[in-house]
Image (tube, grey):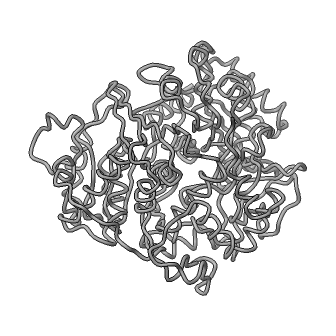
Amino acid sequence: MASPVQLDLFMQRHGLAGYETLIARADRDPDWFWPAVMAFHDLKFFKPFDKVLDVSRGIEWPQWCVGGTTNLAYNCMERALARGSADKPVIFWEGEDGEARAWSYGRLAGEAEHAAAGLKRLGIGEGDVVGIYMPFLPETIAAFLAITRLGAIALPMFSGFGPQAVIERLSDAEAKAVVTVDVTYRRGKPIAMAAIIDEASPSLPALQHVVVVARHPDRPEGKRLWWHDLVAAQEPCPAAEVAADAPAMIVYTSGTTGKPKGTVHSHCGFMTKAALDFGIILDLTPQDRLLWLSDMGWLTGPILAVAVPLVGASMVLAEGTPDFPDQGRLWRLAQDHEVSFLGVAPTMVRNFIQQPPEVVAGFDLAALRVTASTGEPWTPEAWNWFLEHVCKGRAPILNYSGGTEIGGGILAGTMLHRDLPPCAFAGPIPGMGAAVVDESGRPLPRGEVGELALTVPSIGLSRGLWHAPERFIETYWSKVPGLWIHGDFASIDKAGNWYVHGRSDDTIKIAGKRTGPSEIEAALLGTGKVAEAAVIGVPDALKGSAVVCVCVPARDVAATPELADSLKQAVVAALGASFRPKAIAFVGAVPKTRSMKIMRRVVRSIWLGEPVGDLSGLVNPEAVDDLEAAVATMRKG
């Protein structure tokens, strides 16, 4: 018998007739909505708050759960133990080298508490920043919960960062400690992560302690402060009672331009937003096993660390990539662990399409009941392929879009909207006040593309940027006073379905016409001859701007002049002659962030011969060299 849909249960509890009614009431009445979410999940406060929301300092600086105290880690662990889940599996983990481990809720709670006690012995306390520089391991989740348990501030970092990127973030945050691992594996190569911290340490005067998880604790090498020694004393460490809106975490954005931005997330804000997004909107339940291959340094990592134990579900963690050591690794993980909730990125799916069809067909994914996606906008081809070959009519795709600064999502699909058109969202997540507006902030009619904006404060929103309040206002609140402008193009169709069309700062204006790169990329991908595409606008003496396309040919498709000509014709057929590409370059991969978003500003900089800026967020830095070589070859030709 199918479990009841959590969103439906929430609406029934409050006598709401439908999703649009819920959105309207939530946006209008935050004093009702956010406590209702907390009550639905029985979130605990040591001291009840006096006021849900205080905007006396302005809409840009809301204060939440005023007068209350709580602790994010307490809500993740003590609540799980109190409901009798000590022996229930919470983490199933697989290393790239085949090593496998499973932790129960009791093991995770004990490890996190003992690690918190160990950090406390080192002098770490409330308000201190502690970095997490690790791939997905069971200890990664324990470290996050240990840090927040103390009232310290967790700083998760992408496990693929080099020394300079680590220095930038730990230095900006003035981190007193960092937890890392001696070695991890990525596509068969050992990466000495602790050695990278060693290289960075002389540039970090505030850094006092480096705790190292031994990948093989029975044979640790060298004199270090080892994780297994830190937790060995098994001392009790009660969760710190902290102000509900106190910082729990800093997550740095990829740094599209200039210095990476440190978004600040609070105890009450991050846990309540995770409980809403995953425990109500995306329908994660205690019966689910969730697999979302990601990294702790991208927001999905901390969300999983919080949402799964808050709800009482289980998670499957894996080191490395979805297609190594074999193409079917993701599907094998889903099959072997009977995954019921699978998270993907559309860019990842487009790569799967290039695999031989028998790869995914060889696995039994019958346990799947929900799939969710975030990252780059979908294309219809990838959406339909995924529905047919992975979901197979059983599981819907719940499209989910937001950002690091949001603490989760702005738009989403739901289990009550199972038959959405390709690439669509059911609508805004309640409590976000989402709207599509023109450049002056006026709401646009259905069918028109505009800026995605937030019109009300949201509990999950970043509490500013770490040590940079002016930059926070300039980046998000200055374009239209009183509105959060997210930087995405969006639209609503006549049926009320929402769409995201890519970054508004990637806009291409040609001969007086404006479009986002995703429309042109969709035309290229729709030919079936291209696996990936990045489209940019470059200066043009005649049109003002011209289109340049960087494409990865599909499997068994040769990069020839004839292919380039056919792709140009496909763009003309889709968007008109004004958008005929000026040039098409073929590469092996396009630069992408760790969240699988295409770094178009890097593509544009390389094409124009300009400095590429911050590359620390790239998951595939080798793509930069590939593109530079392709551009140089085209210019010689």
Q: Which residue is drawn at the image coordinates 58% and 78% (left, top)?
A: 62
Horizontal side of 301 relative to 425 (left or right) equals: left
Locate residue 186: give its quadrant. top left
Q: Position of residue 527 (x, y in %)?
A: 74, 24
Residue that lies at the very extreme toward the bottom in this rendered image: 56
Horizontal side of 609 relative to 171 (left or right) equals: right
| Residue 611 visible | no
Locate residue 29: give its quadrant. bottom right
Q: Position of residue 595 (x, y in %)?
A: 52, 44
Q: Nearer the viewer, residue 134 or 289?
A: 289
Q: Nearer the viewer, residue 468 or 524?
A: 468
Locate residue 363: give its quadrant. top right
Residue that lies at the very extreme toward the front in this rendered image: 84
Does residue 575 sit above or below 230 in this rendering? above
| Residue 87 visible | yes
Q: Position of residue 309 (x, y in %)?
A: 47, 51
Horizontal side of 377 relative to 586 (left or right) equals: right
Does residue 526 sit above or below 223 in this rendering? above
Q: Which residue is drawn at the image coordinates 70% and 45% (left, top)?
A: 4
Quadrant location of the N terminus in the rendered image: top right
Quadrant location of the C terminus in the rendered image: top right
Does residue 361 sit above or below 130 in this rendering? above
